[in-house]
Image (tube, rainbow, N blue to C red):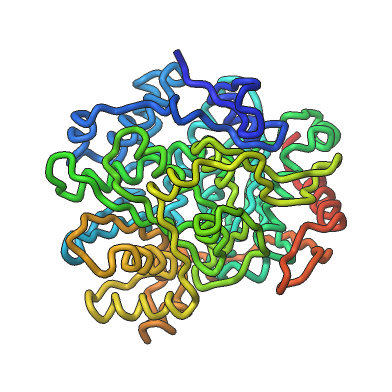
């Protein structure tokens, strides 16, 4: 029997298939699609051990098939995953650094970010489902830097999909911006004043505005999402730690620590699910930057949302991670954003029911890495090991150091999530060397850009945090309605 999914805002309510959840993007009640902890498929350890040495695509099949059995046939899913994770297009490497500490480089896909992995699965599964049903979709995404380019690359020129990405115009790097604005075709980039949370709020409201979709496209279901809120983005992130385990050379059922730089918490939530499936992860380390809401919550038991703050690891500049709702749900709690009748968030991160905080604390450690620590870590790792980390990987490394107090005898896997060449200024400041810009990004430097700017100002300010203004939302609606999207 195929696994079905509920909304985190109503776990006892309507159940939805994977294909319907993929097309909807988000439940109508603004929750997130999720399965209960008890429903997470289990893998016997013997099957996990057999993954050792297998290609990424085969491991992805073993991990994802239990979630998708009855949705795609075995041969169909194998074909999709072999195409998505072709080693010549998206190679993955686990590098032993010192003692038993390893770095998993999820950085060599089409946009040089770990987001490529989930995006490629999402794009292929979405296009397949749309083709089966003779449908079209407009995919909306908010990005803090890496998601937007990865989804854009995965969806570029697909027949059944148009793509709109919102990005904070002053917070993404030039290279990240051009990865979105130079694609053209069915990819449309909209620059938004304010921070990532403003872009994310805009995406969520438009996603659930069925009347707007009906008026513009003649189809109330036309708009869907590929952000971390999409189930089609979450599930493929369960694969990462299984692949890492397959390359670490661990003995028997020896457990390891997964240290994960985290922004919207999709990669961290995927690893929580992997642990539940039976992968021997002893602890999950959730490294964050100046946005300290989660480690503060683990310390105090109170979830308090503040405005997002800028740091060198810009893709993690998220003040209110979407996947916190899934994490709360997994540990028996409930978190939601309070909205008015028009769907606008009036209070973020409201705790309806507290999760099992002690259980969460046993499983997950979270450390906040400040701006100076980013640079210090990048310099120290380069001087000691000759390895150039990007700012996000530096968060993963320093968070691990803070947990194990420099004990490198503990088996550990650090997720490196972006090529250092995407952040040349930060790397140069840290180690005095400018990293080489990846090839495709070099080519995009000279290509013409297509940007749709939203001129309206957000509410709030940089110090206290921004929020979406009605004028910004209206301007976004007007821009999308005028885009050359096939109706």
Q: Pick the residue in front: 118 or 318.
A: 318
Q: Residue furthest top?
A: 1
The quarter of the picture where the N terminus appears is top left
* Outermost residue toward the left in this view: 251
Question: Is 381 placed above or below 14 here?
Answer: below
Examine the image and state in which quarter residue 180 appears.
Answer: bottom right
Q: Is residue 189 left or right of residue 65?
A: right
Looking at the picture, tell me which residue is in the foreground, 178 or 425: 425
**Residue 162 visible in image:** no
In what quadrant of the picture does the C terminus appear? top right
Residue 16's x, y, as percent?
59, 22
Q: Is residue 149 visible?
A: yes
Please report the residue visible at 52 percent of the width from the left and 65 percent of the height from the top. Answer: 444
Residue 261, x across and y down, in percent: 43, 59
Residue at the bottom extreme, as displayed: 432
**Which of the 4 image quarters holds residue 240?**
top left
Residue at coordinates 72% horizontally, 31% vertically from top-left? 28
x and y percent of residue 350 in the render?
Answer: 69, 47
Callout count: 0
Question: Does residue 120 lie above or below 392 as drawn?
Answer: above
In this orientation, which residue lies closer to the viewer: 193 or 313? 313
Q: In the image, what residue occupies the spot 32% across and 45% down?
A: 241
The residue that appears at 36% across and 54% down in the rendered structure is 106
State the image coordinates of residue 44 (x, y, percent, origin top left).
25, 27
Q: Quadrant of residue 414?
A: bottom left
């Amino acid at each position: 029997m195929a696994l079905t999914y509920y909304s985190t805002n109503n776990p006892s309510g309507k159940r939805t298939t994977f294909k319907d959840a993929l097309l909807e993007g988000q439940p109508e009640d603004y929750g997130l699609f999720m399965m209960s902890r008890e429903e997470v498929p289990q893998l016997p350890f013997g099957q996990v051990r057999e993954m050792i040495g297998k290609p990424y695509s085969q491991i992805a099949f073993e991990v994802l098939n239990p979630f998708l059995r009855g949705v795609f046939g075995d041969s169909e899913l194998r074909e999709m995953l072999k195409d998505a994770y072709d080693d010549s297009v998206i190679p993955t490497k686990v590098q032993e650094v010192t003692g038993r500490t390893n770095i998993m480089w999820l950085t060599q896909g089409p946009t040089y970010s770990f987001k490529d992995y989930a995006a490629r699965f999402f794009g292929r599964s979405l296009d397949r489902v749309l083709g089966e049903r003779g449908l079209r979709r407009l995919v909306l995404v908010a990005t803090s830097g890496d998601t937007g380019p990865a989804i854009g690359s995965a969806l570029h020129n697909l027949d059944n999909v148009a793509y709109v990405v919102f990005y904070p115009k002053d917070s993404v790097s030039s290279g990240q911006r051009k990865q979105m604005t130079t694609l053209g075709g069915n990819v449309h980039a909209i620059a938004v004043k304010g921070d990532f949370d403003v872009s994310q709020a805009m995406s969520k409201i438009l996603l659930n505005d069925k009347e707007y979709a009906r008026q513009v496209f003649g189809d109330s279901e036309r708009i869907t999402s590929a952000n971390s809120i999409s189930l089609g983005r979450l599930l493929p992130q369960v694969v990462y730690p299984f692949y890492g385990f397959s390359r670490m050379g661990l003995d028997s059922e020896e457990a390891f620590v997964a240290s994960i730089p985290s922004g919207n918490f999709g990669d961290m939530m995927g690893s929580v699910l992997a642990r539940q499936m039976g992968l021997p992860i002893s602890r999950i380390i959730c490294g964050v930057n100046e946005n300290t809401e989660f480690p503060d919550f683990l310390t105090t038991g109170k979830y308090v949302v503040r405005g997002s703050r800028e740091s060198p690891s810009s893709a993690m500049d998220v003040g209110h991670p979407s996947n916190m709702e899934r994490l709360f749900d997994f540990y028996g709690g409930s978190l939601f954003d309070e909205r008015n009748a028009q769907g606008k968030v009036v209070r973020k991160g409201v705790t309806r029911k507290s999760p099992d905080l002690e259980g969460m604390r046993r499983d997950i450690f979270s450390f906040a890495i400040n701006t100076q620590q980013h640079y210090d870590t990048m310099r120290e790792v380069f001087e000691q090991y000759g390895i150039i980390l990007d700012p996000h990987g530096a968060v993963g490394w320093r968070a691990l150091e803070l947990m194990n107090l420099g004990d490198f005898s503990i088996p550990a896997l650090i997720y490196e999530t972006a090529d250092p060449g995407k952040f040349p200024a930060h790397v140069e400041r840290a180690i005095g060397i400018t990293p080489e810009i990846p090839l495709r990004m070099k080519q995009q430097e000279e290509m013409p850009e297509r940007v749709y700017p939203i001129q309206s100002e957000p509410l709030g300010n940089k110090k206290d945090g921004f929020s979406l203004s009605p004028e910004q939302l209206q301007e976004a609606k007007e821009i999308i309605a005028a885009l050359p999207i096939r109706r």
